[in-house]
Amino acid sequence: MLEIRDLHIKFHNREREAVSGVSLTIHDGEILGLVGESGSGKSVTAMSVAGLLPRKQCSYSGAIYLDGAELLHIDRKELRKKQGKAIGVVFQEPMNAMDPLMTIGKQVEEVLRIHTTCSREERKRLALEALAAVDLPDPEDIYGKYPHELSGGMLQRAMIAAAIVIRPKLLLLDEPTTALDVTIQAQILELLKRLNKESGISMLFISHNLNVVRKLCSRVAVMQRGVLVEEGDVETVFHHPQHPYTQHLIAAIPRRERKENRHGTK
Amino acid sequence: MKYAARRIASFLLTMVIVSFLAFMAFDVISGDPATALLGTEATPEAIAALRTEMGLDRPLGVRYGEWLLGFFTGDLGTSYVYHQSVSEIIAPKISVTLLLSFVSFLLILLISIPLGLSAAKRSGGALEAAGTAFNQFCMAVPPFFTGMLLSYLFGVILKWFMPGVFPDLSTDFPGAMRHIFFAAIAIAVPRIAMTVRMLKSTIQSEMRKSYVRTAISRGNDRSAVLRVHVLKNSLVPVITFLAQTMAEIVAGGIVVEQVFAIPGLGRMLVSSISNRDYPMVQAIVVILALWVVLSGTVADLVNQRIDPRLRLGGDR
Ligand SMILES: Nc1ncnc2c1ncn2[C@@H]1O[C@H](COP(=O)(O)OP(=O)(O)OP(=O)(O)O)[C@@H](O)[C@H]1O
Ligand SMILES: [Mg+2]
């Protein structure tokens, strides 16, 4: 459903390409993990899918197809029709990613207000449903709250609700759990897994932690300095990494965590 | 609503402190007004009698209490110079000064908001550089200079108003308004420049925040991002700034009323100071302070309505 073909992105103010020749495919209903160290180009790859590249500040080539429609070169107006509607995005720090002066409810509804003709009541009903779907207790109460009144974990759930309320085809998750503590992180991973199973929504899950990816994804792609160095079934990559960089990433995971996982969610 | 009550209480407390300081300060500098009034030739008995008559022989605290009570009932004492009730003299001047401040404020809003918004959208290029240079120039010109320039150009040369002669508000309202309008321009120019600059930088820094990216990722176009998210988030610092603008208008007004011969509070203050008319000076200083502190309080209350984070405990 999503196909990235030979993507090159170079910012004018940088020497090196941020992304050089990345090709990736996400199948229907699949969760693809994307791992790599800081600055390897994971976010830039995801942002170019979401239409969030600052086009004037960089040069780009290649192609991105979402269900056959090219995204990288389409004009802004067409792009906006896809943003939020076909592609939802969840960012790393929910506290900053939310408008501090808008209630959670209004932010969850925003996509509906922009892309649908739903009435006010209809929007509220759908928003409450989405808030319930991400396991937030008492959606009615949360609906009227402001971001500063919720914890980081709850906010991230609300961000996920805001992204899925319109049922997009693809959900881009840029390190959605990095800013959260370990228990909350595990809960969010469970939630994403369930949403994927129930609604069949495809996801691109970005993380710098291969172990986290292993809990959630069936397939994983590894990036280093803008280049895709390895791609494949998550267990295969985990147990038989081909590229030295991947081996290095795996070695960086504490041994105890590596073992735990095999019996845990698998 | 509790925060509103708290804010209003702190406003009242501030006013009490400010007025007490004003009262005390003028009590100290004024020396002995009885001597000043009667001259050094007067007999000590006559001075003592006048002191008793003026109530100056009683302690400071008592006199302040009386004065404060009077302030709330509209009794501001008697002018040493005009031998007339201060509130009667001041009342018409307050309306002139209010009018001048109001027109200045309106000019600032009407001109700087559209300019600030369009400056925020544009960045880079020769036009921006020229705009910034012009802006800095406007900021640097003091109101009295603009005032003299405007008086000369529109008063002396074009004769759109008569410099030095302020028409009576009640008989020639349009004439008075024309006069006030040019004075208001003189006050507004540097403040417009500052407001444009602060609007531009506030909006641009909001635009770089992370929630803007989220808004774009949901399919908002630029103008919707601005309308729905950024403007509201820019409002709090802007409103705080506008409250400071109120204070600046008052300060600018004192000078500009001189230049344009506008019979307002500022002009009265200056002449009362040189006449050592302390009841008058006290009253005007406290009224101006009330104006400034009140606009700050209103700004805080409005900001608390806009930003729920400000409603959490404390005054800030
Ligand atoms: N707006 C931009 N302008 C210039 N350079 C940028 C911009 N955004 C990203 N880059 C550069 O592109 C490269 C890739 O950045 P990217 O954010 O994709 O890394 P990442 O893999 O997501 O890292 P992290 O784990 O830290 O999020 C980095 O070298 C970064 O400095
Ligand atoms: Mg990143």
Image (cartoon, coloured by chain):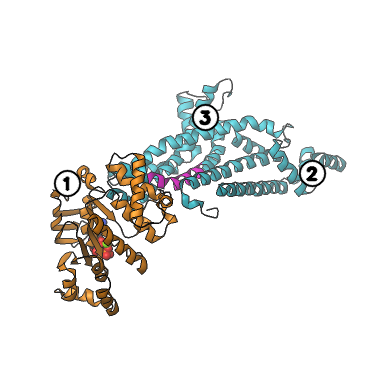
Q: Which mark is residue B180?
A: 3
Q: Which residues are magenta?
A: B230-245
Q: Quadrant of residue A155?
A: bottom left
Q: Mark 2 or 3 closer to N-term?
A: 2
Q: Which residue is mark 2?
A: B56
Q: Quadrant of the C terminus of chain A?
A: bottom left
| Subunit bearing disc 3 | B
Look at the image and give the colour of chain A: orange
Q: Which chain is cyan?
A: B
Q: Residue at x 46, y 27 (%)?
A: B154
| Subunit bearing disc 2 | B
Residue flagged by tag 3: what amino acid is it?
A: Ile
**Other residues around mark 2 within 10 Å, as few (<14) / some (14–19) / many (≥20):** some
Q: Residue at x 73, y 31 (%)?
A: B84
Looking at the image, residue A50 lies above or below residue B302: below
x, y percent for residue B98: 56, 33
Q: Nearer the viewer, residue A196 or B205?
A: A196
Distance from Cα at disc 2 to Cα at disc 1: 83 Å
From the viewer's perspective, is A129 left or right of B152?
left
In the rendered image, is residue B132 in sight? no
| Secondary structure category for the residue under label 2 | loop
